[in-house]
């Protein structure tokens, strides 16, 4: 019995000493904690990173808007028009292309398409309001309005052909980043009709072009300058976006919406393929191929 009591006493002493040592350790640690000004700044490193990403995206957007593309000729044939509308819940700020129908009544095909697809204000407003419902704003608190910006850039233009990229920036209140979407329009100004992948590329060219786009992306990722956070294109996305290209002076440029090949903050949305690298994939009898 004495032996048991002695053992219990020893265990109690050991436990107390351990607890005291731990308390002393915690006390000493708390006394040594001194937050320097540098450490205070380091606390916000993640926020600074987000700010850097926002700055980067703002710069990329400016590059997208101001990027100088050399059209083939007669860019003046495309007239810029504007639309601005303020609503209680959203703002629309549009700049869109228009071809002068007085020069050629056939251009109405292009203008009507722009009007139906991009300038349907009622449909756009309803979509925005539906999106707001998905945010579960049951309190109906008055917040900053959503904003949609649309603009375009002419890549190729002459009396027979027009190649334009339409880009839209959608800002939803409460989201960290605005969202970019792209539509590429290639218009045959002789036949007054829009042109698509099958009008430019040969049959059974998809697999090789898909691999070439991914090789271009992989090389850019490896170089680590602009595509450092990006990834290769999936086969499903290639099929969805294969018609989304414009023709430049010496390349064909495929455009992808946000987060298809790169995260939003990088501002990278397109992949350029030199015409010399895909000449064998193009139809030779197409007089719209201005290269």
Image: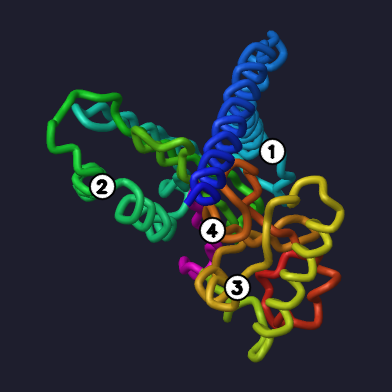
Q: Does residue 141 appear to the left or right of 160 in the view shown?
A: left
Question: Pointer 4: what residue?
Answer: 184
Residue found at x 74% / y 45%: 70
Q: Which tag, 1 or 3, sits closer to the chain's start?
A: 1
| On-image quarter of the C terminus | bottom right
Q: Dividing the picture into quarters, in which one does residue 273 lie?
A: bottom right
Which one is in front in this view, the residue at disc 1 or the one at disc 3? Answer: 3
Real-space Cα separation, disc 1 to disc 3, in angstroms: 27 Å
Q: Earlier in the sequence, mark 4 or mark 2?
A: 2
What secondary structure do most residues of the magenta stretch adopt?
Answer: strand
- Distance from disc 1 to disc 2, alpha carbons, whole Å, reads 31 Å
Name which of mark 2 and mark 3 comes first in the sequence. 2
Crowding around mark 4 (Cα neighbors within 10 Å: few <14, some 14 to 19, many 20+) is: many
Which numbered disc flags the more N-terminal residue, 1 or 2?
1
Return the disc, 3 or 4, that comes first in the chain's sequence: 4
- Percent x, y for residue 67? 69, 38
Instruction: Find out whether residue 226 is within the magenta segment.
Output: no
Q: As displayed, is residue 212 above or below residue 50?
A: below
Q: Which mark is residue 234?
A: 3
Q: Residues within 10 Å of mark 1 (few under 14, many from 20)?
A: few
Which numbered tag is attached to residue 131? 2
Task: List the residue tagged with mark 1.
Answer: 67
**Would residue 184 be counted in the magenta stretch?**
yes
Q: Are marks 1 and 3 in contact (CB under 8 Å)?
A: no
Is 147 or 251 nearer to us in this picture? 147
Q: Earlier in the sequence, mark 4 or mark 1?
A: 1
**Residue, x 19% and y 23% (percent of image)?**
142
Whether 177 is drawn above or below 275: the answer is above
Q: Is residue 121 visible?
A: no
């Amino acid at each position: 019995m004495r032996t048991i009591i002695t053992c219990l006493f020893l265990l109690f002493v050991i436990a107390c000493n351990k607890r005291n040592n731990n308390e002393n350790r915690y006390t000493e640690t708390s006394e040594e904690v001194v937050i320097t000004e540098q450490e205070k700044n380091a606390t916000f490193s993640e926020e600074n990173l987000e700010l850097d990403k926002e700055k980067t995206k703002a710069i990329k957007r400016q590059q997208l808007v101001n990027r100088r593309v050399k059209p083939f000729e007669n860019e003046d044939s495309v007239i810029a028009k504007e639309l601005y509308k303020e609503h209680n819940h959203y703002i629309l700020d549009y700049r869109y292309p228009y071809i002068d129908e007085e020069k050629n009544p056939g251009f109405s095909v292009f203008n009507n398409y722009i009007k139906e697809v991009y300038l349907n204000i009622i449909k756009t407003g309803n979509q925005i309001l539906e999106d707001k419902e998905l945010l579960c704003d049951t309190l109906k608190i008055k917040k900053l309005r959503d904003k949609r910006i649309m603009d375009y850039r002419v890549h190729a233009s002459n009396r027979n052909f027009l190649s334009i990229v339409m880009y839209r920036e959608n800002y939803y209140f409460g989201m960290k980043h605005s969202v970019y979407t792209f539509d590429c329009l290639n218009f045959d100004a002789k036949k007054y009709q829009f042109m698509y992948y099958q009008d430019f590329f040969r049959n059974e060219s998809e697999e090789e072009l898909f691999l070439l786009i991914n090789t271009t992306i992989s090389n850019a990722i490896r170089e680590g300058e602009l595509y450092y956070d990006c990834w290769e294109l999936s086969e499903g996305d290639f099929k969805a976006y294969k018609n989304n290209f414009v023709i430049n002076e010496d390349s064909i440029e495929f455009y992808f919406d946000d987060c298809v090949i790169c995260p939003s903050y990088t501002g990278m949305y397109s992949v350029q393929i030199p015409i010399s690298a895909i000449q064998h994939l193009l139809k030779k009898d197409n007089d719209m191929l201005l290269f």
